[in-house]
Image (spheres, coloured by chain):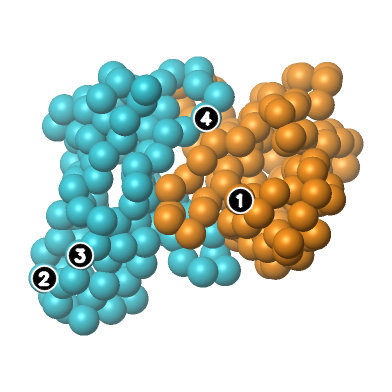
């Protein structure tokens, strides 16, 4: 079974609108971490936001927020007020395991295009 | 700032060649990782290491080996490169208990 599933290969959003990128995960661990990364066309992976499995509040970082629904095993990324520079690939990832023996899993990514 | 560097941004090799991809991090991180990235497949873990001389297989280790003789350096080795190993290779590192990985810029390898 896939550990991380991103069902939207590509999405379009109008500049200044909000957009939600979907991510579901599969784990039997009680302690895990969820991440979102942005990869522009230049190729570097940019860390956006982190949610721990025990965090009760949804994580927020500026225009990014993570909609964490533990029972549904979903960790959707919400980008508010989209900008042209948000056009990129977005990857959802999960860390399993204890802190000294981490293993990370990545989804297949969502390509976001922001239209002017 | 954390810095993870990879020896080459672009590399072209011939089938059957032995290929070395080097990754160096300057922040004394314990864990280091090698991924390959292919369109529609995301990042897939090849190998990771949580200490010097320690290595663990990831999800797709076949055709690859690794070496970690020093804490800051993690090498990926393609013993006999094949065309299906043409891909983007990303290295990452993480300190213990970290909330994220730090990635290098990637090496785009083409095997002809």
User: Horizontal placement of B5 versus A7: left or right?
Assistant: left
What residue does disc 3 label? B11
Image coords of residue B6 (percent x, y): 24, 45
Q: Do discs 2 and 4 share a chain? A: yes
* Visible residue check, residue B91: yes
Give the mark nearer the N terminus: 2 vs 4.
Answer: 2
| Protein chain holding label 3 | B
Q: Are marks 3 and 2 in contact (CB under 8 Å)?
A: no
Asked if B88 appears above or below A31 in the picture, the reply is: below
What residue does disc 1 label? A85
The cyan-coloured chain is labelled: B
Q: Colour of chain A?
A: orange
Residue at 54% x, 59% y: name it. Answer: B42
Q: Are marks 4 and 3 in contact (CB under 8 Å)?
A: no
| Protein chain holding label 2 | B
Give the mark nearer the N terminus: 4 vs 3.
Answer: 3
Asked if B85 appears above or below A108 in the picture, the reply is: below
Give the structural element (helix, strand or loop) at label 3: strand
Q: Do discs 4 and 3 share a chain? A: yes
The Cα–Cα distance between marks 2 and 4, rounded to whole angstroms, is 34 Å
Instruction: Name the front one of labels 1 and 2.
Output: 1
Image coords of residue A85 (percent x, y): 61, 50
What residue does disc 4 label? B100
- In the image, farthest residue toward the left: B17
Say few, some or many: other residues with alpha carbon within 10 Å of mark 4 (under 14 / 14 to 19 / 20 or more). Answer: many
Viewer-proximal residue among A21 and A94: A21
Say few, some or many: other residues with alpha carbon within 10 Å of mark 3 (under 14 / 14 to 19 / 20 or more). Answer: some
Viewer-proximal residue among A17 and A22: A17
């Amino acid at each position: 079974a896939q550990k991380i599933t991103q069902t939207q290969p590509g999405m379009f959003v109008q500049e200044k609108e909000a957009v939600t990128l979907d991510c579901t995960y599969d784990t039997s661990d009680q302690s895990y971490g969820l991440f979102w990364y942005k990869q522009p066309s230049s190729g570097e992976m940019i860390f956006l936001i982190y949610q721990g499995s025990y965090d009760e509040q949804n994580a927020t970082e500026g225009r990014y927020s993570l909609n964490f629904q533990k029972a549904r095993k979903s960790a959707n990324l919400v980008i508010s007020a989209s900008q042209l520079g948000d056009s990129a690939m977005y990857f959802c990832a999960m860390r399993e395991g204890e802190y000294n023996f981490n293993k990370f899993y990545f989804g297949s990514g969502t390509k976001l295009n922001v239209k002017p | 700032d954390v810095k993870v560097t990879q020896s080459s941004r672009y590399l072209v090799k011939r089938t059957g060649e032995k290929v070395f991809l080097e990754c160096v991090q300057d922040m004394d991180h314990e864990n280091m990782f090698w991924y390959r990235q292919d369109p529609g497949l995301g990042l897939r873990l090849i190998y990771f290491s949580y200490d010097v001389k320690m290595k663990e297989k990831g999800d797709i280790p076949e055709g690859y080996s690794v070496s970690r003789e020093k804490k800051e350096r993690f090498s990926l080795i393609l013993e006999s490169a094949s065309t299906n190993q043409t891909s983007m290779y990303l290295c990452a590192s993480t300190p213990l208990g970290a909330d994220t990985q730090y990635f290098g810029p990637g090496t785009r390898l083409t095997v002809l």
